[in-house]
Image (spheres, rainbow, N blue to C red):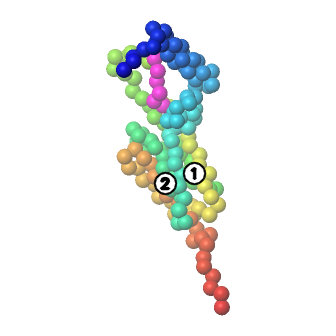
Amino acid sequence: MFERISPFDDVFEQFRRFERDVDELLSGGTSRNIRAFASGTFPAVNVAATPDAINVYLFAPGIDPKSLDTSLQQNVLLISGSRELQPPKDQGTFYRQERFSGAFRRVVALPDDVDPDRVEARYVDGIVHVTVGRRAEAKPRQIEIH
């Protein structure tokens, strides 16, 4: 109904946008956007626990799963690799580049009851799913009283 109350509204919005950009720059490049990654947190990781296993989901679209190095040592899961982005064909100048490029390394601490002999990893639709089984002796069991 009312597009502008004042002819200065657009100018004030530009100042607010400039202030947000300066805040982002001065805060080390981290954005307040909930979908933004902080520095060093690529790729995103979700960790879920069930009574039988720990499931780790690593969101890595566009990465060749054969280029990932995945290891489990002393209840610590380490996934590392790199993603190289192709420069634009017209060699244009980037004014903003949000897609991560380069080497990455994610370390996930797992509970003490994981079984290093029961690990599986799959890559489906850009998601690495690592399942680490839990030791059977660590599971709670029902004790019958006589």
Report if the CB atoms under discs 2 and 1 are less than 8 Å apart. Answer: yes
Residue 58 belongs to the span the image colors magenta: no
- State the CA–CA distance, disc 2 to disc 1: 9 Å
Q: Quadrant of residue 64?
A: top left
Q: Residue furthest top?
A: 7
User: Local crowd at mark 2 within 10 Å, few (<14), some, or many (≥20)?
Assistant: many
Q: Name the outermost residue toward the left.
A: 89
Q: Is residue 132 left or right of residue 143?
A: left
Q: Earlier in the sequence, mark 2 or mark 1?
A: 1
- Does residue 135 appear in this view? yes
Residue 11 image point, x, y percent = 49, 10
Q: Is residue 97 left or right of residue 124?
A: right
**Badge 1: residue crowd in 10 Å (few <14, some 14–19, many ≥20):** some
Q: Is residue 93 above or below residue 73?
A: above
| Image mark for residue 130 | 2
Q: Is most of the magenta stretch helix, strand or loop?
A: loop
- Asked whether 7 or 63 is in front, the reply is 7
Amino acid on which disc 1 is placed: Leu
Amino acid type at mark 2? Val
Q: Quadrant of the N terminus?
A: top left
Judging by the rendered image, the residue that carries numbered circle 1 is 77
Q: Is residue 25 visible?
A: no
Q: Is residue 98 magenta?
A: yes
Q: Which residues are magenta?
A: 95-100
